[in-house]
Image (spheres, rainbow, N blue to C red):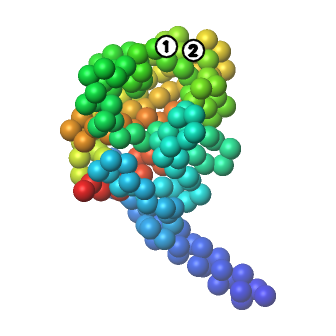
Amino acid sequence: MIFRRSVLAVAVVLGAAACSTSTAGQAQPVPTSAAGPQIAVGTMRVTLPLGAEYTEHSQDGLLDGCISEGTVVCEARLLDLRETTSDPNAPFNVPSAKRPFGWYTGTDVPLCITPAAPPGAGAEATGSTLLESGFAPVGPKKAEYGRWQVTCADSAQNSQVRMWWLPTSKILVVQYGAFPGWDAKMDNLLAGATFT
């Protein structure tokens, strides 16, 4: 019995060491043996974290493009906006780190989306202050990137939102309720993105 525990402990340590290599400043993709399913969003393919699910379309449309994990209904959204951006009559704001609610593409009042308040259930967003902006890698491409501190009518829903916008591919990625654990997962997911 002691021998089996020792072998198992060595296997776990070796497995963890093999999966933990990284280069400073850039996330490294998770090996496919430790990852979930691959999904396609427009021309982009990504591998979800193990245990995560992607809802391409929901009946009410509120969860379209959502990545969910455990009790979190919409941790992030990955959206193909090619059709929306080509319709001149669509109520649409182009994603941009140059405006306060640049992560929000609607023309109505933005709602706060957090682990406790999924799409459609959040309070009204009352403020959105840009904390960082620039360009960030999404696979081999560079996306317009922004991080905002979002304040809400219900202050318990105040959070940070991160956005990656690929204007040529028309793909928008928005991470809700950002914090270090999810930041690392999203960076890793996007580092492994491929395009067709």
Relative placement, left or right, of 89 versus 112 is left
Total numbered badges shown on the rendered structure: 2
Secondary structure of residue under mark 1 = loop
Q: Where on the picture, by quarter, is residue 89?
A: top left
In contact (CB < 8 Å): disc 2 and disc 1: yes
Provide residue 134's location: percent of width, then percent of height. Answer: 27, 30
Q: Which residue is mark 1?
A: 109
Provide residue 114's location: percent of width, then percent of height. Answer: 59, 30
Q: Where on the picture, by quarter, is residue 39?
A: bottom left
Distance of label 2 from label 1 (alpha carbons) = 7 Å
Q: Which mark is residue 51?
A: none
Residue closest to the eye, 91 or 22: 91
Query: Which quarter of the rendered picture does the C terminus lie within?
Result: bottom left
Query: Which quarter of the rendered picture does the N terminus lie within?
Result: bottom right
Circle 2: is it few (<14), some (14-19), or many (20+) Cα within 10 Å?
Answer: some
Secondary structure of residue under mark 2 = loop
Q: Is residue 12 above or below residue 151?
A: below
Give me the residue at 40% from left, 39% from top: 79
Circle 1: is it few (<14), some (14-19), or many (20+) Cα within 10 Å?
Answer: few
Provide residue 44's location: percent of width, then percent of height. Answer: 32, 51
Relative placement, left or right, of 23 versus 3 is left
Q: Which residue is mark 2?
A: 124
- The answer to whether one can see residue 36 in this image is yes
Q: Amino acid at mark 2?
A: Glu
Residue closest to the eye, 55 or 18: 55
- In the orientation shown, which residue stands out farthest toward the left? 168
Q: Amino acid at mark 1?
A: Val
- The answer to whether one can see residue 180 in this image is no
Provide residue 186's location: percent of width, then percent of height. Answer: 45, 46
Give me the residue at 49% from left, 61% from top: 37
Sequence-earlier tag: 2 or 1: 1
Give me the residue at 57% from left, 34% from top: 60
